[in-house]
Amino acid sequence: MGEDSIDLPQGTLDLLILKTLAQGSRHGWAISERIHQISSSVLRIQQGSLYPALHRLERRGWIKAEWGASENNRRAKYYALTRSGRKQLEIEESAWRKLTVAVAQVLEKA
Amino acid sequence: MLRDLAFRLRALLRRGAVERELDDELAFHLDRQIDKHMAEGLSHAEATRRARLDLGGVNRVKEECRDARGVTLVEDLVQDLRYGARVLRRSPGFTAVALLTLALGIGANTALFSVIDGVLLDPLPYPEPDRLVTVHQSKPNFATGSIPYPNFRDWQKESRTLSAMAIHRSYGYSLTGRAPCGGPAGRRSSPALGGSCGGTAEQVSALLVSSSLFPILGVEPVIGRGFARDEDEVGAPPIALIGAGLWQRRYGGSPDVLGRNIVLDGRGYTVVGVMPASFDLLLDGRPRDVYVPIGQWDNNLLLDRGAGLGIHGVGKLAPGVSVAQAQADMDRVAAHLAAVYPEKNRGTGARLFPFERAVVGGVRSTLLVLFGAVGLVLLIACVNVANLQLARATGRAREIAIRMALGASRGRIVRQLLTESMLLALAGGALGLVVAGWGTPSALALLPGELPRAGEISIDATVLLFALGVSLASGLLFGLVPALKATEPNLHASLKDGGRTMSGSRHRVQNLLIVVQVAMVLVLLVGAGLMVRTLSRLWSVDPGIEPAGVMAFGIAFAPSMAEASPAAGRAHLRRVEARLKAIPGIEQVSPTTGALPLQGDDEQLFWLDGQPRPATSEGMSWALWYVVGPEYREAMGIPLLAGRFLGPEDGERGALAVVVDDVFARQFFGAADPVGKVLHLDGYDRPAHVVGVVGHVVQWGLDSDETQSLRAQLYFSVMQLPDDRMARLTGIEMVVRTGESQPVPFDTVRAALQQMDPDQVAFDPRTMDEVIARSLAGRRFSMLVFVTFAALALLLASVGIYGVIAHAVGQRTAEIGVRVALGARRNDVLRLVLGQGLKTALAGVAIGLAAALALTRLMAHLLHGVSATDPLTFAAVAVGLTGVALLASYLPARRATRIEPMVALRHE
């Protein structure tokens, strides 16, 4: 974990999880690794907060869970996007883009 | 939404499996993380440590996952309950007052509901109670007269709409003869006589019945058999059923009572069965000792179609027949009989009433009025608790604002506050059950024998359900408004002013609640006031006698007297009088038969001298008929208005003498002097001379005597009864006046009479004071309940007004301080605060008066001599309640006048 990594802003973890799962189903550890890798270790995800988020998303019906065999042949819980999860991802993605664009504009021009 | 629910449900219901899955999931994660760290070259131990650090506390993660899974709906509730309990514990004063208020409100409601449930709602303990009717013979002006036995037999034969009909007649027997000692026998006998179980004479209550009675009611003997079809015929062999009470008392509950001989009024009867303890024909709490077929009645009037012998009937409607249809059918039957036997049956009819009406008839409306009153008490209690909560919410505004700022939704906090209210309501309800469990029996004890089906009142499942429902409804009622008010989105303001001042709208709500409360209290107070006025009116009705020191009781002569000649009977009566008179302390003694004021009525037909003898009884007049001894007038304390009372000279050999009351005199002689007038008594072959006039005595009840059509009274000497009546006397009532200083114990009287003959029984002693009190017991009970409710309501409302005004003063300390600093005088402050209380109270009084005008009409049947809109009561209550409200506001107002401006301002 890099020393200059930053904490994840509130509410963005769900978005990241959904995005990660858009490429296919993964288990919890793989999700955390994937986010870590892609963000070039800049985003520091408290691994402990990942699982409550997964359970919350599952309850909302945006992801579904299934037990399957892992790459080293162990039983693992795999999460995958549902159709409403995909829709939710689109909504959150566009909201995020609008927000960042707006914030960036303010930062540049103010 | 559905998926969400399914998910939560699985999380909740399959908790174990879900937990195991979570464990597995986290274990897998840790293993992978450990593998990763080991791949980076760490030792296994170090890799494990690092993996755990990366994850954070496993337990914390699990806890958060549980939250995320959303078992929260239930878990929130548990959490809210815990939190609520903590909050309530933290403010013990508020909690105690609220709990007490609710316990009283819910308790009173539960108590009254248990009465209504037992008396009105539970079906009668007979199969198909809807098909049961009571049957009477109606006479002009009187719907529920007794049925002559021959008419009953004809009705039974000719009715097409009643599947069965039966009759019953109350009776008292003198039970004598040896009884085996089984159990606690002879309990009723005098200890002075040793209380041996054999041979002790006692008076037993009996019912003469037709064979059809028990089958109609679906009641069977617990052992033995009932009466067969023909066993109620005149001349059938003498048999009897005994009640469970007598069975236990005299035979120790032994089954070999069957086939035994019991001696009733000197005649032997074979016991064929025992009736269940629960059997109580009219459910009036007076189960009988003995049941005898009516054909055994040794009364030569039994077969007389014109005799009114106190026989009443029960019928069962044929399937599918309504009471109205059966009534129409019976009208036809009665009309036919009137045509066949005109001299005895003209003007009579058969009347049917639903059985339930006969049992609980008059009580229903009373209970419903009381239930309405107690409902108001609960509403007042709820308003009080709501106001307390509102006042407290001001203090909690900061807590709530912070929780909302931290992201709790309004719904979540309303739910939390409501949970707290429900907790309070349920605890109050539980306490209320205790109040009801204790209060109902003690209240009913004030009402001996006046409430039908009183034995069936208990706290059963229905009552518990009612208490639960009422508690929950109360919780919602007093919790919702404060919860909504407390969470009104004025977050910013609350945080800013530190939760010390009250928002105007909340204050308005509090005042509105007080207005409602005052209005409800006023309605209750007016109701109670009207009842009190009714009772005081009744107590001041002159009964026409001086009841203090007067005792009445019954004597059953020894069975051997049945064979005595009329002369011997008269001699015995004189000996009894003399024996009683010899008891120290007894001043006057009089036998009495026939009517007895407030206890039993008897009538005599007569016609005035100078009229030809009317052909039928229809041409004669009725008078209340008192057959007494020479000392009766003095014993009862009846004033003599003219002439003389009956004396010893009016004996069996003298001319027939009668004394009339002033009502009789006015009605039949007008302004003429009654003394010396002559009447002809139906059934007597000699004319009777009026020898004196006495004051009218209330016969029918202090509340109804004046409205009765039959009020004229005739006194007649018991010694002048015709020989055949004299020979039939198996006993007599006695009235004695004792010195006012020391009452004579009844045991002394009983012992004296038993000394004359061991088989002679004295029973049922009662003082005239008791008789009068009992005649008003029902009204008195309603009044007491009403007054208790009203007092409770007044107390609650006073506390409520005081609380709200005191709170308002506390909130306005600063404002008042500023006013004082600006030169307001103490009186101005006093006026300001009192004015606020007065305004609220007056609004409540005005609304309450309007409501009371509309509502007290519902209780008109409970009133006597007072109009339901009695202006005096209304005015007195309005003024009194306003005064109480002012007083309740005065205390805080006085505190307001002591506010020092500097202190007040610093306080802010």
Image (spheres, coloured by chain):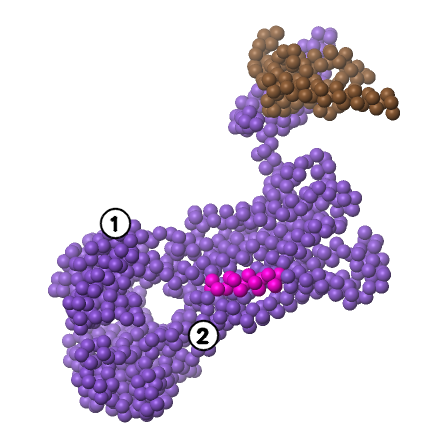
Chain colours: A brown, B purple
Magenta segment, prevailing SS (helix, strand or loop): helix
Depth check, front residue: B870 or B96:
B870
Depth check, front residue: B314 or B744:
B314
Q: Which mark is residue B538?
A: 2
Magenta part of the protein: which range?
B844-859
Left-right relation of B594 to B744: left
Q: In the image, what residue type sits under mark 1? A: Pro
Left-right relation of B64 to B767: right
In the structure shown, which secondary structural element does the residue marked by tag 1 occupy? Answer: loop
The crowd level at tag 2 (other Cα within 10 Å; few <14, some 14-19, many 20+) is some
Q: Which residue carries the number 1 mark?
A: B319
Residue B42 location, quadrant: top right
Q: Quadrant of the N terminus of chain B?
A: top right
Task: Provide residue B538's location: percent of width, then percent of height.
Answer: 45, 74
Q: Choose the circle earlier in sequence order: 2 or 1.
A: 1
Residue at horizontal 21%, vertical 64%? B334
Q: The residue marked by circle 2 belongs to what chain?
A: B
Residue at horizontal 26%, vertical 84%? B716
Task: Provide residue B646's location: percent of width, then percent of height.
Answer: 29, 88
The crowd level at tag 1 (other Cα within 10 Å; few <14, some 14-19, many 20+) is few
Q: The residue marked by circle 1 belongs to what chain?
A: B
Whether B678 is drawn above or below B390: the answer is below
**For the residues tagged 2 and 1, is the chain the same?**
yes
Q: Nearer the viewer, mark 2 or mark 1?
A: 1
Residue B693 location, quadrant: bottom left
Whether A11 is drawn above or below B286: the answer is above
Q: How many marks?
A: 2
Residue B177 visible in rendering: no
Task: Provide residue B351's location: percent of width, then percent of height.
Answer: 27, 63
B2 inside magenta stretch: no
Q: In the image, what residue type sits under mark 2? A: Leu
